[in-house]
C-alpha cells in the first residue's frame, strides 16, 4: 500500500483536517496498550490497538467475579470472587505475554480499596503474575472515568457519573477538563445489602444523592454522561422497550421521562426473560433493579438537560492519560477515519482531496455536519475489498456499527447512507428502513447528494494530492457546473458522465461540464 508520503501529499498542508499524527512516535508508542480494571463486580482486560486518537478494541475480555459481594457485612473480599479474579488475572498476564504487550497497567477500585484483605490480594497478584495493581481512591477513579469520556468527546462539558459494583463517582467536566469530583458507596452490590428492602434502599439513595448534589455545588441542567455496566444494561433495556433499531450503546440518548418508564418496565418484567432478550448476564441483571433506583434519583435531583451513555470509562481514561496533549485535542472521529483510510484505501490521502471537491455543494453546513462530510470522504474507499454486490450494504453496516467515538446515532445513519450512495446508484434502502427513519427527509436528501458526489469524484482521481477539478452549485439558477483539469479530462467517460447526471438530478439541477482546454459541452439535462 502506498503511504501519504509516497503519494507526495504535503503533510504540513492539511487545511481543516490537521496534520496526521498516527505515524508520529508519540502516537505509535500507544499502538497497542493493555489495561486491567479490577472492579467490584467484574475484572476486565482491554487491549487497545491503533491508538491514533480513537483506538480499536484489539482484545476485550470480562469475568464477572463479584469481588465486592458481601463486603459490607464481612469486611473482606468475596472468597470465591477472589479466586476467580486471581485466575482471570493469571490468564490475562499470559495473554499479554503472548501478544508482546507486557507489562500490563492494572487498577483496582472500591472493593479492593475497602476490603481488609485488599492489600493481601494485591500482593498475591503481584507474586503469581508479576502484575502490580494500583489501588486508586474514589476521586482518582472519578478522574479516570471522566478522562475516558474525554476520549470520545474532546472539549466536553457536563457531569460524568460512573457506577460500579460498590461505588458511584461523579465528576464535573468543563471545557474538556476534569473539575470537582466526589465518590459514594452507591454501588448496587452494596445497596442490596441494606436491610428493609426497596423502600429502605430508596430512602438511603435519596439522602446520599442529596449530599452529593450539595458537594457538587448544586449543579443542574448539565449533560449527564453515564459510565458503567449497570447504566449500559438499563440503556439496553430502554432500547428493547422502545424497539430501537440501532443497538450501539455508545452515544445512546435517554430522557428523564424515558428512564422513569424503563424503570417501571424493569420492575414489572420477568427479569430472566428480559435478561435473555437483552443479552445481559445473570449477575448484571440482578443489580439492574437497584441501579434504576439510583438513576431515577440522580436524574430527579441533578435535573440534566440530556442524558447520554458512554461506553468509554476508566479503562479508556487510562489510555487517555498516556496520550500527548496534541493527540488528546484531536477529533476522535476524523483521526479514526484517517487511520482507516491510510490502512485500507487504494489511494490513501485522496479523502482530503475529495472533501475539497464536494464541499461547494454544502456551503451552509455547521461544523458538526462538516466533520461528518469529512469522515465520509475519508471512508469512501475503505470497503473496496467487499464483493461488489454487497459493498453498499457492508459500508452502511460498518458506519453504523463501527467502534467510532464522537458520533451520534443519527450521524452514524447519515454517514452510512451517504456511503451507500457512494457505492450504489440505487442502494437497497428498504432493508435499513427503521434506521433511516431516524433521519429527516432533508437529511436523507443531503446524504444522497453527498454519496453521489463522492461516487462521481471517485471516478476522477488522478493522484492523492491533486484535485480532478471543481464543482460549483448555483442554487438560485439550479445549475451544477463541473470544471475538469486537463489531466482529469480523459477520465470523464460514459460512466463518469452518468454519475454526474445522477448528482445533478439529486440536486434538481441542470448539469454543465467544462474542460481546462476550453472545450465545453452540455451534459444531459437533469
Image (cartoon, rainbow, N blue to C red):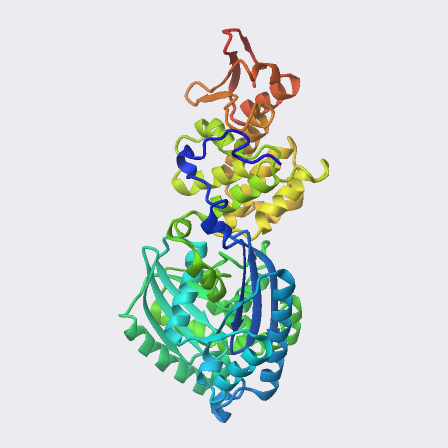
**Position of residue 172 measured from the top left corner of the image (x, y, whole percent):** 33, 64
Q: Is residue 299 visible?
A: no
Q: Residue at x 64, y 16 (%)?
A: 493
Quarter holding residue 3: top right
User: How many discs appear?
Assistant: 0
Q: Position of residue 244 (x, y in %)?
A: 57, 57
Pick the residue in front: 429 or 48.
48
Q: Quadrant of the N terminus?
A: top right
Foreground residue, 442 or 519? 519
Q: Does 253 sit left or right of 99 as displayed?
A: left
**Residue 69 falls in image quadrant:** bottom right
Residue 411 against residue 78 in the figure, above or below: above
Q: Position of residue 241 (x, y in %)?
A: 57, 64
**313 displayed left or right of 83:** left
Give the farthest residue toward the left: 217
Q: Residue at x 51, y 30 (%)?
A: 354
Q: Please state, as top left, top right, bottom left or bottom right, where the C terminus lies in the image.
A: top right
Q: Is residue 240 visible?
A: yes
Task: Classify residue 505 by image quadrant.
Answer: top right
**Which residue is painted at 39% across and 40% down in the image?**
367
Identity of the residue drawn at 57% across and 43% down: 340
Q: Position of residue 447 (x, y in %)?
A: 53, 36
In the picture shown, does residue 318 fall above or below 474?
A: below
Amino acid at each position: 500500500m502506498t503511504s501519504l508520503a509516497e503519494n507526495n501529499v504535503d503533510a504540513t498542508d492539511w487545511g481543516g483536517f490537521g496534520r496526521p499524527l498516527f505515524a508520529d512516535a508519540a502516537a505509535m508508542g500507544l499502538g497497542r496498550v493493555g489495561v486491567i480494571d479490577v472492579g467490584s463486580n467484574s475484572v476486565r482486560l482491554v487491549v487497545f490497538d491503533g491508538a491514533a486518537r480513537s483506538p480499536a478494541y484489539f482484545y476485550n475480555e470480562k469475568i464477572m467475579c463479584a469481588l465486592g459481594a458481601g463486603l459490607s457485612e464481612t469486611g473482606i473480599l468475596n472468597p470465591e470472587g477472589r479466586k476467580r479474579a486471581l485466575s482471570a488475572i493469571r490468564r490475562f498476564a499470559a495473554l499479554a505475554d503472548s501478544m508482546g504487550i507486557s507489562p500490563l497497567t492494572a487498577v483496582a477500585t472500591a472493593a479492593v480499596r475497602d476490603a481488609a484483605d485488599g492489600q493481601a490480594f494485591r500482593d498475591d497478584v503481584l507474586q503469581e503474575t508479576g502484575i502490580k495493581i494500583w489501588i486508586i481512591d474514589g476521586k482518582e477513579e472519578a478522574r479516570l472515568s471522566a478522562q475516558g469520556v474525554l476520549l470520545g468527546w474532546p472539549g466536553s462539558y457536563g457531569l460524568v457519573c460512573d457506577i460500579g459494583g460498590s461505588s458511584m463517582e461523579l465528576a464535573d467536566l468543563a471545557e474538556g477538563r476534569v473539575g470537582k469530583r466526589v465518590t459514594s458507596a452507591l454501588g448496587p452490590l452494596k445497596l442490596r445489602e441494606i436491610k428493609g428492602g426497596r423502600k429502605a434502599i430508596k430512602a438511603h439513595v435519596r439522602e446520599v444523592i442529596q449530599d452529593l448534589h450539595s458537594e457538587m455545588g448544586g449543579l443542574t441542567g448539565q449533560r449527564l454522561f453515564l459510565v458503567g455496566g449497570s447504566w449500559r444494561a438499563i440503556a439496553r433495556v430502554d432500547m428493547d422497550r422502545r424497539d430501537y433499531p440501532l443497538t450501539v450503546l455508545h452515544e445512546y440518548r435517554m430522557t428523564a421521562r424515558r428512564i422513569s418508564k424503563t424503570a417501571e418496565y424493569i420492575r414489572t418484567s420477568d427479569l430472566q426473560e428480559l435478561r435473555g432478550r437483552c443479552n445481559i448476564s445473570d449477575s448484571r441483571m440482578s443489580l439492574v433493579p437497584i441501579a434504576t433506583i439510583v438513576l431515577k434519583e440522580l436524574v430527579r435531583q441533578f435535573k440534566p438537560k440530556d442524558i447520554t451513555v458512554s461506553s468509554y470509562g476508566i479503562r479508556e481514561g487510562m489510555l487517555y492519560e498516556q496520550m500527548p496533549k496534541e493527540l488528546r485535542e484531536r477529533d476522535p472521529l476524523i483521526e479514526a477515519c484517517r487511520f482507516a483510510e491510510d490502512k485500507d484505501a487504494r489511494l490513501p490521502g485522496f479523502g482530503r482531496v475529495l472533501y475539497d471537491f464536494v464541499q461547494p455543494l454544502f456551503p451552509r453546513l455547521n461544523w458538526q455536519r462538516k466533520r461528518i462530510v469529512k469522515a465520509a470522504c475519508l471512508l469512501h474507499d475503505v470497503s473496496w475489498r467487499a464483493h461488489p454486490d454487497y459493498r453498499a450494504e457492508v459500508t452502511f453496516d460498518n458506519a453504523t456499527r463501527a467502534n467510532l467515538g464522537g458520533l451520534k446515532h443519527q450521524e452514524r445513519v447519515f454517514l452510512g447512507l451517504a456511503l451507500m450512495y457512494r457505492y450504489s446508484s440505487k442502494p437497497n434502502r428498504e432493508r435499513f428502513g427503521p434506521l433511516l427513519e431516524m433521519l429527516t427527509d432533508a437529511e436523507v436528501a443531503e446524504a444522497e447528494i453527498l454519496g453521489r458526489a463522492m461516487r462521481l469524484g471517485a471516478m476522477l482521481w488522478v493522484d492523492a494530492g491533486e484535485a480532478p477539478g471543481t464543482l460549483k452549485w448555483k442554487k438560485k439558477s439550479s445549475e451544477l457546473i463541473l470544471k475538469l483539469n486537463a489531466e482529469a479530462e480523459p477520465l470523464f467517460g460514459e460512466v463518469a458522465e452518468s454519475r454526474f447526471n445522477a448528482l445533478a438530478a439529486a440536486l434538481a439541477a441542470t448539469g454543465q461540464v467544462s474542460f481546462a482546454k476550453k472545450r465545453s459541452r452540455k451534459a444531459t439535462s437533469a
